[in-house]
Image (cartoon, rainbow, N blue to C red):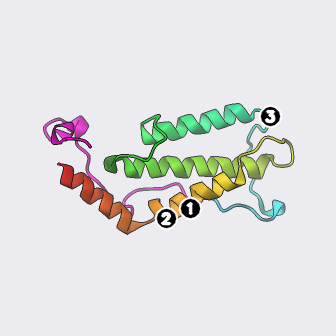
Amino acid sequence: MPSKSDYDEDEPSKRRSFSKTDDVEFEPINPLPRDKDKMSMKNINCDDFSRYALNCTMEAALEYNSSRKAPPMPAKIIDWCKAIRHLTNCAIDWNSECREVTESHFNEESIKGHMHVVDNVCDDEWFLSLQEQRFVDVL
């Protein structure tokens, strides 16, 4: 558990204020396509799944500003949610665009799990306010 000294208010780099999710611009989750004729084309290079997956992971790590894959500390929940949304959209985009041209794909059940986290954690105002209160209580 972090101590009060971990969040020294005099040091700006350690201060974190929460903003309500209404103030935060989230990347919307693209629904899983049911009909291949309704898929939008994003010009993904479907020849290199490993590079695409690595790029998505690195972009998400930059959003979260961490390489940790564990659930975040309360102060990082908004950034963590942005990263989860980004990873989810990357996977949906690849599977939608490259399904017909490669056997490499993201696991559909994993995508659904990420979508569940977004719906039940990242979009849950009560949960986010509870995390904000935990962060404030530590201070």
Q: How far apart in space, not on screen, are marks 1 and 2 (Cα)?
A: 6 Å
Q: Is residue 122 left or right of residue 52?
A: left
In front: label 3 or label 2: 2
Q: Which residue is mark 1?
A: 116
**Above or below, comparing residue 91 to residue 8 in the picture:** below
Q: Is residue 63 left or right of residue 113?
A: left
Q: Is residue 28 left or right of residue 38?
A: left
Label 2: how many residues lie within 10 Å, few (<14), some (14-19) or many (20+)?
Answer: few
Percent x, y for residue 13? 25, 35
Percent x, y for residue 136? 21, 54
Would you say residue 90 sits in the magenta stretch?
no
> In the rendered structure, which amino acid carries the disc numbered 2?
Asn
> In the rendered structure, which amino acid carries the disc numbered 3?
Asp
Q: Residue at x 65, y 52 (%)?
A: 110
Q: How far apart in space, not on screen, are marks 1 and 3 (Cα)?
A: 29 Å
Q: Which residue is mark 3?
A: 47
Element marked by disc 3: loop
Decide which of tag 3 and tag 2 comes sooner along the chain.
Answer: 3
Disc on res. 120: 2
Q: Quadrant of residue 130?
A: bottom left
Q: Which residues are magenta?
A: 1-28
> In the rendered structure, which amino acid carries the disc numbered 1?
His
**Above or below, comparing residue 115 to residue 107 in the picture:** below
Percent x, y for residue 83? 50, 46
